[in-house]
């Protein structure tokens, strides 16, 4: 039995695997105990896998396929999930778990349009200029970035509270056509009810965000919030430390106080788009 399954970028890989495993287990008439006895696993370990709290090894996925008579269904899914994750930098992967499951994302970006709101061409220019990256690797990362945006297409997407610095509107990352298309896309995205887009103007003279961008993820009830801090370092940029997350949340609120209102921000982006058109 072979069922083609593809990774869903809007769902945590561990959760997707666990959901599919539970579905196949039940369809084959297996209780958790029966499957555990067949693959030599404890019920608590199987529950953790099915609930997305831990991932399986390739050998365990193979044994589950054999026990359930699935051919290579689960091993194939696990392989595709691992390959999809490998398209992103290793230090960024832990953040995807929070990003996919967050109920709200509060973003401050001082340098470029946030990845979740980038066009493919804008993302390609940024990612293809990284030192030592091949054209093929750049395209894989562009595809992975576009797939990340699928969380915004869910029936119940996360709320995005986005603040960008005014300088982003004038920074010539790419040619006029790409920049114009990017800001038109930004305006379109800002029309969505689940996206709040604001611009921090130069006249605000705010310095709180000069140290770099960050994102605070508000998680479902029972899960503490997390934060992602942009840095030139490849050290772990993800934090779940309550004191650090609270500090970044406060910084975000103070930056937002100085930002333009949504309609004023939209007007500024529209004016910038016209300038890129000429």
Image: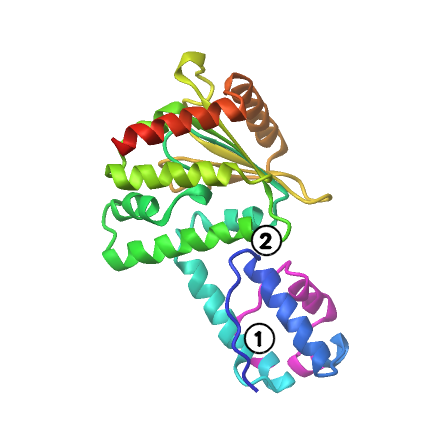
Instruction: Decide if residue 154 is in sight here.
Output: yes
Q: Earlier in the sequence, mark 2 or mark 1?
A: 1
Please name whichever residue, 170 or 60, is drawn nearer the observer in this view of the structure.
Answer: 170
The image position of residue 5, as x and y in percent, is 53, 73
Q: Is residue 67 left or right of residue 88?
A: right
Q: Quadrant of the C terminus?
A: top left
Q: Main secondary structure of the magenta part?
A: helix
Quarter holding residue 63: bottom right
The image position of residue 235, as x and y in percent, is 42, 41
Question: Is 89 drawn above or below residue 67 in the view shown?
Answer: above
The image position of residue 232, as x and y in percent, is 35, 36
Quarter holding residue 248: top right
Magenta residue check for 72: no
Identify the element where label 1 is drawn.
helix
* Mark 1 burial class by Cα count in 10 Å: few <14, some 14-19, many 20+: some
* Mark 2 burial class by Cα count in 10 Å: few <14, some 14-19, many 20+: few
Label of residue 60 in the image: 1
Chosen colour scheme = rainbow
Q: Is residue 202 left or right of residue 8?
A: left
Q: Residue at x 23, y 38 (%)?
A: 175
Residue placed under numbered mark 2 in the picture: 154
What segment carries the magenta color? 35-63
Q: Residue at x 39, y 38 (%)?
A: 184
Q: Quadrant of the N terminus?
A: bottom right
Q: Residue at x 31, y 47 (%)?
A: 121
Spatial distance from mark 2 to mark 1, Cα to Cα? 31 Å
Please name whichever residue, 195 or 217, is drawn nearer the observer in this view of the structure.
Answer: 195
**How many marks overall?**
2
Identify the element where label 2 is drawn.
loop
Label of residue 266 in the image: none
Question: Is 18 drawn above or below residue 4 in the view shown?
Answer: above
């Amino acid at each position: 039995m072979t069922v083609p399954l593809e990774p869903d970028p809007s769902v945590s890989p561990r959760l997707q695997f666990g959901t599919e495993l539970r579905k196949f287990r039940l369809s084959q008439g297996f209780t958790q105990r029966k499957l555990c006895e067949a693959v030599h696993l404890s019920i608590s370990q199987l529950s953790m896998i099915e609930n997305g709290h831990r991932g399986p090894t390739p050998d365990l996925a193979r044994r589950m396929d054999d026990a359930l008579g699935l051919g290579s269904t689960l091993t194939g899914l696990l392989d595709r999930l691992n390959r999809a994750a490998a398209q992103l930098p290793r230090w960024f992967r832990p953040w995807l778990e929070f990003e996919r499951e967050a109920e709200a994302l509060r973003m401050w970006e001082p340098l470029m349009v946030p990845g979740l709101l980038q066009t493919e061409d804008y993302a390609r220019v940024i990612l293809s200029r990284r030192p030592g990256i091949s054209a093929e690797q750049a395209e894989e990362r562009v595809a992975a970035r576009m797939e990340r945006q699928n969380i915004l297409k869910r029936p119940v997407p996360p709320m995005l509270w986005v603040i960008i610095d005014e300088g982003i509107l004038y920074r010539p990352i790419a040619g006029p056509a790409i920049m114009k298309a990017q800001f038109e896309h930004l305006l379109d995205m800002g029309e969505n009810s689940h996206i709040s887009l604001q611009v921090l103007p130069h006249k605000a003279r705010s310095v709180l965000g000069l140290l770099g961008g960050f994102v605070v993820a508000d998680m479902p009830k029972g899960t503490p919030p997390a934060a992602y801090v942009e840095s030139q370092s490849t050290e772990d940029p993800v934090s779940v430390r309550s004191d650090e997350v609270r500090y970044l949340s406060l910084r975000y609120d103070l930056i937002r106080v100085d930002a333009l209102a949504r309609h004023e921000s939209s007007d500024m982006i529209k004016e910038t788009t016209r300038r890129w058109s000429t």
